[in-house]
Image: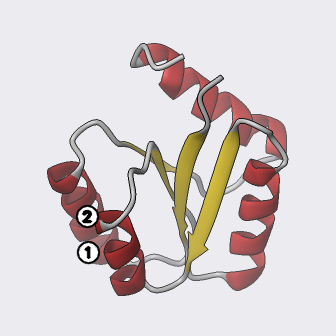
Amino acid sequence: MKTFEFLILGKNQAILEILTRLVNAYEEWNAVPFSDENTAQEYFLNNKIDIVLLSSGIEDEVEKQFTSFCLKAQPDVEVIEHFGGGSGLLRSEILHRLHLTGKL
């Protein structure tokens, strides 16, 4: 079974830690968290990422620029904005996107 590689970008450290723990709870998912977009971009350029999760605290302009950067560098990446809700909602959002794009 394929392991999906996640990059999580968020400015709220507590939420970033929770999201990372929730994603990494699934055997077929692997997440690496970042609170700095420049460090995240460097990691993104050097790794194949399947899903980018954008979390809370990111300024609108930074979010737009980071999304554009990701899609330009790896056009097949899925960028998902996740700003809250329970762990079931997060998993549903991810699985729904993967299903819609034929990646599941």
Q: Secondary structure at mark 2?
A: helix
Q: Position of residue 104 (x, y in %)?
A: 54, 16
The quadrant of the image that shows the N terminus is: top right
| Residue 72, placed above or below residue 8 | above
**In the rendered structure, are the residues bearing label 2 and label 1 in contact, judged by CB atoms less than 8 Å apart?**
yes
In the rendered view, does 58 fall on the left or right side of 3?
left
| Residue appearing at x 56%, y 82% in the figure | 11
Instruction: Classify residue 68 by image quadrant.
Output: bottom left
| Residue appearing at x 39%, y 59% in the figure | 47
Query: How many numbered discs?
Result: 2
Q: Position of residue 53 (x, y in %)?
A: 52, 55
Q: Residues within 10 Å of mark 1 (few under 14, many from 20)?
A: few
Q: Amino acid at mark 1?
A: Glu
Between the residue at mark 2 and the residue at mark 1, the CA separation in whole angstroms equals 5 Å
| Residue appearing at x 54%, y 83% in the figure | 35
> In the drawing, what numbered circle is on residue 8?
none
Q: Which residue is label 1 attached to? A: 61
Q: Amino acid at mark 2?
A: Lys
Q: Nearer the viewer, residue 20 or 87?
A: 20
In the rendered view, does 4 fall on the left or right side of 27?
left
In the rendered view, does 8 fall on the left or right side of 23?
left
Q: Nearer the viewer, residue 16 or 64?
A: 16
| Residue appearing at x 20%, y 63% in the figure | 69
Q: Residues within 10 Å of mark 2 (few under 14, many from 20)?
A: few
